[in-house]
Image (spheres, rainbow, N blue to C red):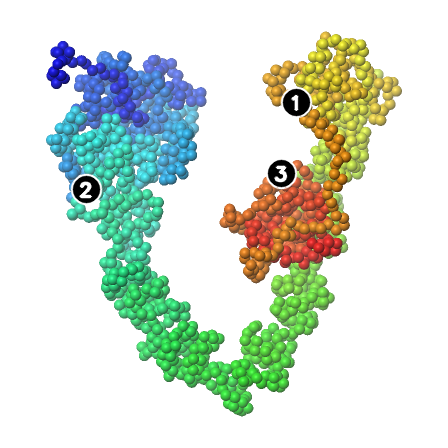
Amino acid sequence: MASLGKNVTAPTRTPKRVEVNQRALVDKVLARYPEEFTVFRELLQNADDARATKVLIEFQTKDYVTHSAGANGKTNGINGMTDIPDLLRTKLHRWVVRNNGDYFEDKDWGRLTKIADGNPDEQKIGAFGVGFYSVFGVTDSPMVLSGGKSLSIFFQGDQLYTLDDTCPQSEWTSIQMVLKEDMQVPAPKPFDLARFLAATMTFMSSVENAHVFFDNKIFMKIAKSRQVPTPIRVPKHMIPRSKEDTMHIKGLSVVTQEITVELTDWARAAGTKMTSAHRSGHEVLSKDPVKRKGFWDSSKRETPKVAKVTKALSRASTYDHPPWLTHNAKYAVYSAQVTTTPSKDLHKGLRAMTKKDPPTHFDFEMVYFSKEELDARATEEKSDPDMGSIFRGPQGLFPQLDRDGEYMSRIFIGQSTAQTTGIGGHMSGRFIPTVERGSIDLTNGHIAKWNQELLYVGGFLARFVYEQEIRKVQDAWPVVNGVVVPTADSRASASREKALYAMRYFTFQPSTPDAKVSKILQDAFFDCFDYSSNVHFPILTNSGIRDTKDVREIHADFSSFMKMVPTQLPTSPGDPPSLVDSLPEKYGVRTYTFSDVVKELKGRTLQEEEMIGCLRWWVNFISSLEADEERESTLTFLPNLTDNAKSRIGNSTRVIELCDITKFVDSTVWLPWLQSDDALPPDTIPFSFTRTLDRRYISSSLLWEPMTLVDWLSHLISPQIDAAHDICKNATYSNRVLGVLGNIWPTMSSDMKSQAKDLMQDVPWIATNLGFRPPGGAYFPEADVFRDLPVVSVNLFDQQILTVLNELGVKRHLNFEELFAKADKLSTWSATEMIRYLSTDPDAMERLEDIRKYAVFPCDKGGKYCITDLYLPHGEIRPLGLPILAWSRRIDKDSEDEQLLTDMGFLRHPPLEKLIEIAGNPDPEVHRAAFGYLASKFDELYDTEYDPSKYDDMPFIPAIRDGHECVGAYEEVYSDPSWALMGFQKVHPSVDRKIVGRLRLREAPSARQVIEVFKKNPPKDVNIATKWFAFLATKQVLSPGDLQQIAEIPIVPVVEPISHSGPVEPRLVPPRECFIGGGQYGEGHLYRRLFTFVEFEERANRFLKACGVKTKPDCSDIVHILIKDPKDFLKKAGAEGDPEKYLVELRGIAVGYEGLSEEDKKRMKTAPIFVGYRTSKSSTDHSALVVRDEFQLVPASKVLLADDMENRRIFGEFVWLAPQDELLEKLYESAGSGYLSAHIKYNVKPTSEQPKWTRCEEVRKAILEKLPIFLHEFDEQRLKQASAHRKWDDKSRFFVKGCRDLKVDKRLDSNYRVVAEPQRESHEFHVSAEITTEENGAVVLWLKKTESLDMYDVAVALCRLLFKTHKKHDVLSLMTILETDKEVLRKRGYDVDRIEQAHEAAKLEDKQKEEAREREARNKHSDGSGRGHRSNGNVRFRSRFFDFFRWPSGSKNTSVDVKEIDEAINELMKQCAQGQANSEEQREIRNREHSGAGRKLKDVKYCTELKSTTLEIVDVAGAAGFIPVWRQITARVEIPGELTEFANIVHGLNGVLNLSNSEKGIFNIFWHPEDPDLMGFNRNRLIFLNLAHYTTKLESGMTPGQAYIHWYYIILHEIAHNKTPFHDEHHELLVSALSYQFLPRLHDVEEVREYFNCATDI
């Protein structure tokens, strides 16, 4: 105390107590416990310290606490049920945690009242005495009950107080926690709590069971069970002492532990707080944060979501007898029995920090989860992604092994801490944590040293477990015939996966929050073995489990031939770090050494491919050395390589040894001529070994020299050569050597050639017909005219061989004296030999003119002829009976023989006229031979001179008619055999399709011929008709116009049902008069009596539809038959007494009226087909008046629409009135019926005007205010004058006047009278409101002055004034609005303000229009007299494509491959004939589009599929023939009548492109009036053409000829897109080529020819 200061007096030095704010202190303690379930963690640890085996956790509601076990019997329920607690919404009042451990002793009660007074028992976990105070996180007044005593702890102000008491004796020690107000929330998620508790109990020494209750109802059970531990001896090579000798590992053991979690379904239904990110934690997260979820949405964090209920709940599932969901998990717990011998200094420091001695012994434990168990967790997560696994998640038992995993293994100090281990298993030991137990303390002096020493035990145990698990895999690895199965083998898959799992399990990752933990563990993991006596570290290799000292790093240069040494498994870029990556140098995998290579070569004979790999490695390595000195030094190792290297050659048993090799085959000289089976000198390595080596470095790397020609030839003539390669005895191989020499001879130097000739000059190795000769003793064949010379037998067609033979000295000619002497004496020569010889002798060829004068050359049939009288001996000419040169062998086209004989004057081919004449020979053999010759030679000889018009009446074409063979003329035969079905003559099947095209035979008859067949020989029965119709449906011959002609021809056989038996002769009807189907109508249906129905198969029906046949009668068909005989129609409809059935048909007509043609509408207006009603009055016998309606069929113009019920009542008996049906009224009006009110004359008679009646101004104001509200929903077309009412606010335009009495006189227009009305000419009525119109246009509304004005009459008068026609509900609606206040209208949903604004805007617009009309009237005289010029007569036309589709001029690529273009055109037209692309071809088209996306122009405004993708097909009743017709779904305009004209043009162009006979059409027409600039597009090879573009061009004056030209280029443009989707130079070239190809056929179109006659400049 004296140290405080010398001058301080004694009284002032009295000590003062330091006040502590205990509430703030507790709050600071609680701030160190941030994790969820901290209270349960600490209380369970206390229970375990108290040796409890069972723990109960109770969540109690206030009702339960208050009434002792819920006396009222009620709990909140789910979905209205009271038998299942609602864990999501029911708030809790109290938590209770009970355990059956030791009761509190006095020292325990004492520590409860002292903050930071830890448990001095060294075997207890608690160290700092603050764990219990975590309860203050949920309560302000905990109570502890144990052994009959209780202790309450509570705050008064900021100070803590206690109150002890007694309580009933119980086996349980209980901690009761009445929750703070802000903690009175629903219970924690049971699923999450179960996950926490299952992990918490793992390392507890005593606690085996935990039950959780809601009030007194149990909903969770967790049980832990352990088998009997298996002791394991500490391996002798492991170091069982920590570095500072503090920790001693005395023993090891392993035990299997199982955790069982049972959870009721209603508890599970409460879901989980785990977010979707947590649930998908097993997924590998991208290392790129940009690609992670939430990167772009940092302002929003994903909130926890309640998982879905995965199992439905039922009322039968009460919580008294709940269905339990059970989860099990098994795992191994390895344990190290540790004793401690801390130094005195360390012991003292620890006691000072923890207030107790460090433990002298304890068990350090580590969990190992098997691969099967970890896979089971993944399966659970996958099967229930909403909830996940109960064993894995936040604070869960099972970790994730992924590097970026969210749930990693933890350090346990009794309970889990926040500190991760960095490997796959949890660890538990007597670590000293930080105060909040979040991690272990590695910073504070003695505590840090203790923890570091203890981490050594963790690394030791981890290494022991790894060794155990990996050796298990090694022991179980499959072995076949004593050989370990390779890792990649499927038989080793199970072992491979287990080994990979174990290595991944013990791959150290950075630990959190303190990264030093995993680093210390990893160091211990690798340092706990005595390296001086054990350098073994097992890992998975390509050959199973091997120690790293025996493993090599994988390397591409060695992998092809190093097979004996195991290598590590290959990895890929981006793979996570592996255990191998973290190995210290002492355990590291080594690289290959030269000793490894030599050992491999000594150990076995390599296969050829392996030796090639070895040589490649050596050559590449030596060639990579830049320093000469280093290269020379390395080459000293070459003998070690070559002396031990042996290899098989290919698949043979022959073995070569590199020590015997000195030469190699130089590929630049010998390849590809020298083959693998050719003989090589024994010191030359086969080329297959050096093929892949860089020849530039072979000599410098292997010290071998290239094999020379002399080396090779010397070997071939050496005595040791085998018989198969002896060139002096084996003629075949001799000739083979000549072939090789011929190819390499040009590359040889002059010196080498000289050496070779000198070597071989006297060697008899040239094979001849008289045996082997030296080169100077052999002759070429042309010299042996008389067959007595030794002629070389080698193939002399190879010019290079001829060159070699020439240079070696083989002779070619005889001298003339010898030749003519032999020719005079011998008769053994032939024309073949003589001509050949003469052709090779330049001197002899000079005498050809003399030779041609003599008939010395033999004919094949005997006799001799001059050269100019003989035909070449071609096989196809012989059957023609012409004189043939006697030639000993076949002469091929364009062969040297043929050219030689032709040059000498022999004839090649007969002329065309002679050939066609022979083809008409009645002898079938001669005919076939002649036609066959014509076919084979047509392209070569006769194409240019062939004109079919010259031979149109000459039968020379093989054909079939009615199943019999014949010969037909050009005009009689068609190339498509299918047309024989209709009696046409077809080409004989033996005729090649190519010659059919060359002869320009037509594929199909013309449309005119087909129509003639229908006229002269229509199908006789249904079977024939079906075949004909189905066939024509597959052809494109008939245009829409042709089909319209056929529609009028009686060709459809109809069999009428008759009563008597026997054959029925069908009746032929035109397609126009029948319908397809009819099955939808019953036998008694009206349409069955009115129309003819037929039914064929699908394709035949398609043909009839193209002719205009419909599937059912439509509106126009009904109209036609109705107009034809209305009374008969009425009779057949059964409506003579009651017209309702007749009206049904009229309603159908009303629905389709707008689709009728103008002609049909015109005929309807005058036809008496409309039902008219009138009221008929008559008297009965009893003088009673009977009123009834009578009807009659009358024209629409004679019928009126009753738009006013009062007028109908008055005048109904004098006029024909339309039925009161809105649909029919619209039809009647369209057909010409007027409205009854329009034909009634109104005479308004007001009397005694009342000018001062204020009601008039009120009504006027109401009308002006509310009339716009009434009219805003009406179409202005319904109004008589759209804007007239907007001018009524002008008082001179609209008046409301009152009068004392108001009458109106109504008179009917006499023109519509059915019955005269002699009694009265008019009807007078009293009304309360009526309107008159002044001469100046002003409107006057007259009101009869009464106390209560009837606004109905006002509404009637206004509606009659405003509307052209009106309905009763219009009147009622207006009346209601006029009588209702505006505020009420607002409440009823009327947007009054917006309507008024729109009304004012309309008034302003009216004013502006009026001003504009006045200005236009003033300026009318200045309107331009001519707004354009249109030329008369000849209209000059140029398609926009004319300039675009030209052969490229000045293009970058000026070289054009014509053959390639022709092939492309042929392919395009072949595709067109095939129709739509199949699915595979469509993928190819999309790939081509994608490959050029972004680089080339694909879509333009006049050619793009994108602008017309929403098309729907429409039925146009055959108006387009077989061409499908589509409509843009947004099109509001109906398809115009020009469709048929356009379809005819498209059909004509189909013929121009020679596609008329194709079975699959490619053309489609679509109607897109909103985009007439869009000409068309190509969709999967189908061409879509816009009818709207056609009609637009028609309006601009385009002629038919111009239309053909215009659409010709459009179609070719789209067809070219089959090859390229882009508008580039390739597309331009294709279009130009296509247009050039078919222009002659376009010119043959009649409309085009007509156009050119009047416009030659295009």
Q: Nearer the viewer, residue 644 or 1125?
A: 644
- The residue indicated by pointer 2 is 528
Does residue 225 appear in the picture of this structure?
A: no
For marks 2 and 3, the one nearer the N-term is 2
Label 1, residues with CA under 10 Å away: few <14, some 14-19, many ≥20: some
The CA distance from mark 2 to mark 3 is 80 Å
Residue 1311 picture quarter: top right
The amino acid beneath tag 3 is: Ile
Discs 1, 3 touching: Cβ within 8 Å: no
Q: Nearer the viewer, residue 1242 or 1492?
A: 1492
Residue 312 picture quarter: top left
The CA distance from mark 1 to mark 2 is 96 Å
Quadrant placement of the N terminus: top left
- The residue indicated by pointer 3 is 1529
Q: Nearer the viewer, mark 1 or mark 2?
A: 1
- Residue at 25% from the left image edge and 33% from the top image edge: 411
Percent position of residue 1532, x then y? 66, 36
Label 3, residues with CA under 10 Å away: few <14, some 14-19, many ≥20: some
Q: Secondary structure at mark 3?
A: loop
Q: Which mark is residue 1358?
A: none
- Residue at 28% from the left image edge and 52% from the top image edge: 553
- The residue indicated by pointer 1 is 1400
For marks 1 and 3, the one nearer the N-term is 1
- Residue at 30% from the left image edge and 68% from the top image edge: 704
Q: Secondary structure at mark 2?
A: loop
Kindly give the residue lying farthest to the right in the view shown.
1318
Quadrant placement of the C terminus: bottom right
